[in-house]
Amino acid sequence: MRAGRLELRRVRMDLVSPFRTSFGSQTDRDILLVRFEGVDGESGWGECVALSEPVYSAEFVDGVELVLEHHIWPRLRAAGDISAADIAEILEPLRGHPMAKAAVEMAALDAELRANDTDLRSYFGVTRDRVPSGVSVGIHPTIDDLLSAVEGYVRDGYARIKLKIEPDWDIEPVREVRALIGPDMGLQVDANTAYGRDDIDHLCQLDEFDLLLIEQPMAEEDIIGHARLAAASSTPVCLDESIVSAQTTRDAIELGAAEVINIKPGRVGGYLEARRIHDYCLDLGVPVWCGGMLETGIGRAANAALAALDGFTLPGDISASARFWSRDIVLDPITVEEGSVAVPDAPGLGYDLDLDELERVTYRTRLLD
């Protein structure tokens, strides 16, 4: 393909309920969607997972839009004939900005697959048509509120519960949820960097609850701290924010800082780098799972295809669309049945847009020629 135009579309979508983590509370999402248009009529959409503020990572949605306009898109326009697989190398001189790079690579991959009348599931060569679904549960005002929410997700049929934790909201909430769901249901926790090395003994108290993993308890730069926790705790340590590439994955595993890897395509620069990380971990026997960033049906469909690869042995955060949105921007939103979701097989990334809803939630559109 040869790059023709890039559409930058900003949409605002309200969450069905507030979602609180250790770095803040969200009631809505300001989302940047990008549409890649080739000069021969190819067209595909990508979704940027950056938040409104640089609290999860250094990227934020206004900054991503600027980087796309002034740095990424001019390079792709100047590159001539390209495929989605070329984009990472073309953009390699630009330091950082993996979420911006991932969004445009995702849109180009969607366009390329649609032009060839194929789907992401076939492109990845996966054999599974369903993947287990977990749900991420935010921090609640009270433990009773938390238990009420978890009861609802258990009734909805999720295969695994993930609890957000922070100092003073960890041991007791986990204890109560484990008692509620019983010893056999998968349970894990996510700290989003809320702890430090001085908290290692405290975090080891979570060992009694037979958790699948503890996710990113310390700062993303603190690889040694995570390695020390992994040595002290029987609960597997999983890295999220620290994993921004295949190289950081290799380093974390080699240093003993990660026994499980959370792969988020937007965080690592795109679905093709996510595939490389999966392949590396599969060769080593290191389990991986697909994390979520409150995606719309665009990203949710692509995540389901990624999570169908053989190395994804733990349930991911590919929850039902209704977990976050009263109405999604795709025509056939993801649903959970008996603890799993279907891997979409529509051309491209696996979705069809609900154009009426997309227009309703759009508040700004710009075209880059």
Image (cartoon, rainbow, N blue to C red):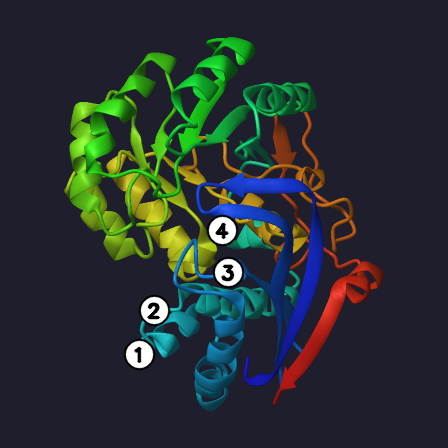
Q: Which of the numbered marks, if any, corresponds to residue 124?
A: 4
Amino acid under disc 3: Ala
Residue at mark 3 to residue at mark 1: CA–CA distance: 21 Å
Tell me if residue 40 can be seen. Answer: no
SS at circle 1 = loop
Q: Are marks 2 and 4 in contact (CB under 8 Å)?
A: no
Which mark lies nearer to you, 3 or 1? 3
Q: Residue at x 76, y 47 (%)?
A: 332
Which mark lies nearer to you, 2 or 4? 2
Q: Which of the numbered marks, if any, corresponds to residue 96?
A: 2
Amino acid under disc 1: Pro
In the picture, the quarter occupied by the N terminus is bottom right
Is residue 25 depicted above or below 85 in this figure? above
* Residue 214 image-quadrant placement: top left
SS at circle 2 = loop
Question: What residue is pinned by disc 3?
Answer: 50
Residue at mark 3 to residue at mark 4: CA–CA distance: 25 Å
Question: What residue is pinned by disc 1?
Answer: 93
Q: Are marks 3 and 1 in contact (CB under 8 Å)?
A: no
Which mark lies nearer to you, 3 or 4? 3
Coordinates of residue 213 in the picture (x, y in percent): 36, 28
Q: First in sequence: mark 3 or mark 1?
A: 3
Q: Residue at x 52, y 70 (%)?
A: 104
Q: First in sequence: mark 3 or mark 4?
A: 3
